[in-house]
Amino acid sequence: MTIENLISTVAVASAEEIRMGESASLRFEGYRYGSEISFFLVTNQPGQGPDLHRHPYTETWTVLEGEATIRVGDETIVATAGTTAVSPADTWHGFKNTGTGTLRLMGIHASDHIIQEWQDEDEA
């Protein structure tokens, strides 16, 4: 079966369609494709990563390449390729690339929409 035949029955999101601006990172929201999950496929350079934020659902990360320092609530872990970590719903969390090379990380959201509240917005 060719990709053209699958398109009529399978929703397909090309990387260019879900790319975040000019970055290498991707943002997939499931509701657009009939999926019950959403995800970020992050490609970050050293020092990059999101500040503290939270979601009304769990988020699960899997580090594909590199090193990330992940903060979840009061806990901090250093995660390398193959490590999976989970943030509970409504818990402040964030991560930074603390390695010397590229970080590739999949952040899976247990929601068909990405709903995000930034901590610095909460303090304003």
Image (cartoon, rainbow, N blue to C red):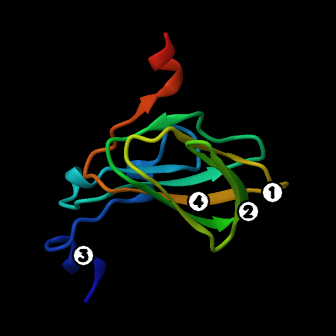
| Residue 49 in picture, x, y percent from top left | 64, 41
Q: Horizontally, is 124 left or right of 69 in the view? A: left
Instruction: Look at mark 4 in the image and give the residue it sits on.
Output: 105
User: Which quadrant of the structure image shows residue 78?
Assistant: bottom right
Residue contact between numbered discs 1 and 2, judged by CB atoms under 8 Å: yes
Cα–Cα gap, marks 2 and 4: 8 Å
Cα–Cα gap, marks 3 and 4: 29 Å
Residue contact between numbered discs 2 and 4, judged by CB atoms under 8 Å: yes
Instruction: Tell me if mark 4 has few (under 14), some (14-19) or many (20+) residues whose alpha carbon lies within 10 angstroms of its own.
Output: many
| Residue 109 in picture, x, y percent from top left | 37, 54
Instruction: Look at mark 1 in the image and give the residue it sits on.
Output: 101
Cα–Cα gap, marks 1 and 3: 37 Å
Q: Secondary structure at mark 1?
A: loop
Q: Amino acid at mark 4?
A: Leu
| Residue 72 in picture, x, y percent from top left | 56, 47
Q: Residue at x 29, y 59 (%)?
A: 37
Instruction: Look at mark 2 in the image and give the residue it sits on.
Output: 66
